[in-house]
Structures are given as C-alpha cells and as structure tokens.
Image (cartoon, grey):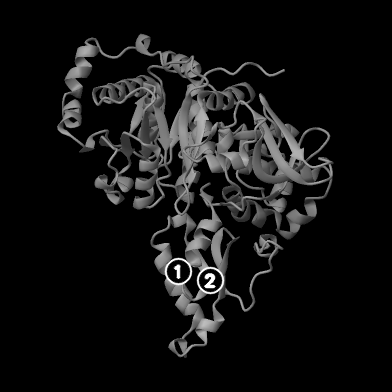
Amino acid sequence: MSTPTKHIFSYINESIRSNWDRPGFSDYGEKTNYTYGEIATQIARLNLFFELAGVEKGGKIAFCGGNSSNWGVSFLSVLAYGAVAVSILPDFTGPDVEKLVNHSESQILIAGPVVANKIKFENMPGIKAVISMKDFSILYAQTDNYQKAFDHLDAAFAERYPDGYKPEYVHYQDDNLDDLALINYTSGTTSAPKGVMLTYRSLSTNCTFGQEWIPNSPNDNIVSMLPLAHMFGMMFEFIYQVAGGTHVFFITRLTTPILMKAFQDCSPYLILTVPLVLEKIYQKKIKPMVNKPLIKFLWHVPVVNKIIKNKVRDGLMAAFGGKLKSLIIGGAALNGEVEACLKEIGFPFLVGYGMTECGPLISYVPWQEFAPHSCGRIVDRMEIKIDSSDPLHEVGEILVKGEACMIGYYKNPEATKAVLMEDGWLRTGDLGLLDEKGNIYIKGRNKNMILGPSGQNIYPEEIEDLVNSIDEVIESLIVDRDHKLVALVYPDYELLKTPEYADKDIKQLIISAIKNINKNLPQYSQISDVEIRDQEFEKTPKRSIKRFMYK
C-alpha cells in the first residue's frame, strides 16, 4: 500500500535547516556557490522584493533562463512566496517568450542573460518588473514604485532581519497540496499555448516517490544537465535533490567533454539522461572495445567472460565518477543493442516513463528488476490501464490516473478536454501493452513528439506548418535521423513547371527558404537536411499522413 504524499516543502524546510552550512548549489566550473543557508537567505530577499512590488499570493511569476544555481534559487523563491511559478524554456525565440509571459499573466519575469537580450519589455505590458537571473538586479521596472522597491531592498531586509536570516525563520507553507504550484509551457509557438497546470500534490507525490525509492542524502552529489524548464530535470535533478539535502552541480554550458569531466569531478550517485547521451558513450567507449576479435571470442567463454564483462562495467562506472548507484533513462526508448550490452555487463541502468502532465513520473522500477524493452511499472499513488480489450496482447492507448496528474492546460479548455476524461483518466497519447507483472511496453507515440539532443520536446507538426508555408511546398514531414531533423518535402510540381521557375534548382530553392525558417527556431529544432519526394505521402482515409511509414 502506498504511503501518503509528503509536501515538497515539508522536505525542503527540514533539509535547509539541517544543512544550513553545507554546500547546496554550484555552477560547475564557475564561481557561483551557495550553501543551503545562503539559498534560504537569497529566497528571503527575493520574497521581500515580491512583497514590496505588490505581487499577490497566487500571482504568476515567470522565469526563463539556462540551467544555473540562480535558476534554482528563482524557482524556490517563487513557490516559497506563495506565487505560481511559470516555467518557460529559454530556447524559445524572443517573441515566443513574450507570448507565453503574456498568456500566463505573469507580473514578474526573472530572465537569464541570453533571454533578456532577445525580448522586448514593451511587448509584455502586464509585466511589472524584469529581474536578472544572473545577479538578481533589476533590468526593467514598469513604474518608479518597482524601482524604489528594489533600491530599498537592502534597507528593508536589514530592518526585517536585524540579526541576519537564520535557520529558524525557514518555514515555507506545506499545507496546500491542492493549490496550483506551477504552469509549465511545453510548446505553443504556432498554436494555442499549452501551459500544464501542476499542483503541489503532483510535485510532492513525485518527490515522495523519489525519496522513498531512490533515497539521497547530504553526502550525495548530483550533476544537473537536463533542461530544468522540463519536468524530468526540474523534479529529479533539482526538487527531489533539494529535498534530500544533496549538493547540486549545475552544468551551465553543456558539451560532452564538460559533462564527462563533471562526472569525474563530482561523482554523482544518480544520473538522469536521455538515450542519446548513453548511446554516444556506448558507441565511443564500449563498442570499439567489445568488437575487438579476441574480446568478441572471449565474451562467450565461461568464467573468462565474467572477468571481461566486469572490467567493461568497471570502466564505464569509473567514467561516471565511481559512485553511481543508478542511471535512469527517460524520454524515449534506448537502442536495443545498447540496452542488451548494458544488461549483460550488469550496469545499473533502467528506462522510465513520464510526461510533463504527470509532473513527470508515470513508471519506474529498480534497475535490478528492469525488464528488457520495458519502461518500468506504474509508480505509487497512480493507476494505469491500456485502452484495449486485451492489454497483454492488444496495443492500446496508455491511460493514467492519480495524484500526479495535471489539473488541465492553462486557459485552454479545448486541449484539456481532449486529454482529461470526466472520470479523471488522462490520455497519454502513447500506445502500449502491460505484462502480467505490470511492466509497461511502449509501442508507439500518438503525439509524434521527437526528443531533442538534451531532452527538449520537439513537436514536428509545428515545424511542418512553417515548411508548408513555403510557396513551392505542398506538404512535408519532419523526421529524426541520427538525432538530426530532416524535412521530407513534396513540392508543388505544377507551380515549378511555370516559366518563372525555368532552370531553377528545386532543392536549393527549398533549402534557402528553410534557412530563413531556421533563423526563428530554437537551435535544437532546426532542420539539418532536406529530402525532396517525387510522390505525395501515403494518407489515411482522413487524409492524414501515415507517419509510421516514413523514417
């Protein structure tokens, strides 16, 4: 039987007070470092500014910036104040960020340096102030009142806490499980924005599950590399880590060499990643070794093969810092060859399953119990069913229900109604099966979402809409090939027969137009190549493209 959900701030209140002088946040390779006491003090300062600026409890405060210690401080400050956190991916274009800030009705925006340089304050009329995520200085004030609130912040803080901010002052509200905590924008640049509304209950049940099944402590380190604006990184590389008092090292500039050095230097107890990272390591470090003729032969020789497999495992563990207890893969299926090899050598990995709308976890299982090709079993305080007459053998849509589920999409009742059923079941949009032990096997994605190289959600329909707007294009399909986006394009051949297009190169025309499209797209969703088709795509009776036929 599942235990009751424990509020995230019940964990965090205790964690901050108990670990006041211990390291909390560090920007890896940079000078920014906070103890848990310094985190709490900075939260108190920001909370005082929100108060002086007149932000009401339950008001919206947006933040948009790259992974950093100050991102973490910003997030905790918003929730600790009693405001609703609005999380926006920093990779969005300036106009998209502005659109989502306006849609969310946010009163304050905390912006990273890159974001601050690409937005225009005048395009967000509801914003009272913009705060720099880099140093918490004020970048924009709608009126003198907000500038004065910032200018007098030091004096006001000294007056309120004349003896300094102390551990006994930390008591963030922890009796509001069913209040709205977070609006997380997953997309919405070319259609109605989809801001996932998550309550404290959703965040807290995820955190409780993490603490009960993968307990951490102040003696543990974690490397935060996934986008914090997405729920997988936000919850399990950040919120659940703070709840246990771990030391979080934020990767502010993600490259493979920096990441691998961070693993060596920080020795994380847990690593969360997307398949691409592990597949790259396999291709570069493991495959060349196991493909050597002698190793291939000895791999199947009794007794000797155990020694060899242990050496391969030990080498991989050392590459991850030597203290790894578990590596969790999320977002997509792991390559079968990689999965089989890691299983053979006894590497502590598993594949989980989740979605933003569940804050994010849906399924998990300890790595020792992980069934090949599965993605674990339904987590505590959640239910699952397959929408088919025979869930063991007949593929159907995966439906989930429970404490982690969102309460809807912000100001988007049509999208909410499409996925949230009246009896509380949430349509995941994914197709799958369940075995007798409850293991989940995902067989397809209704939503067609593509996972970006660092865990970003890429929605191909939005990009296709832009490609289809090119004069010379009738229809297109965006596919993922070796983690690069390729546009399959069926041109308007009738148009291209006109004199205006005589002697013109069709592919070069379309490539040129797509280069212009790429300028307004985040780096991770830009089109890398174009493939011209001479026939239109195969269609369903409803005239939808049969996506499964194209790779």
534 or 350, nearer to the observer: 534
522 or 103, nearer to the observer: 103
- Of helix, strand and loop, which one carries label 1? helix
Q: Amino acid at mark 2?
A: Val
297 or 383, nearer to the observer: 383
At x 51% / y 67%, what residue is drawn? 468
In three-dimensional space, the C-alpha distance between marks 1 and 2, rounded to whole angstroms, equals 9 Å
Which numbered marker is on residue 514? 1
Name the quadrant containing residue 538: bottom right
Name the quadrant containing residue 422: top right
- Of helix, strand and loop, which one carries label 2? strand
Circle 2 packing at 10 Å, graded few (<14), some (14-19), many (20+), is some
Circle 1 packing at 10 Å, graded few (<14), some (14-19), many (20+), is many
Residue 287 x %, y %: 66, 55
Q: Is residue 516 left or right of residue 412?
A: left
Name the quadrant containing residue 4: top right
Q: Amino acid at mark 1?
A: Ile
Residue corresponding to mark 2: 530
Figure check: 75 above or below 291: above
Let me know if residue 432 appears in the view: yes
**Image quarter (top left, top right, bottom left or bottom right) of the C terminus:** bottom right
Let me know if residue 218 appears in the view: no
Whether label 1 touches label 2, CB < 8 Å: yes
Residue 376 x %, y %: 71, 36
At x 55% / y 76%, what residue is drawn? 491
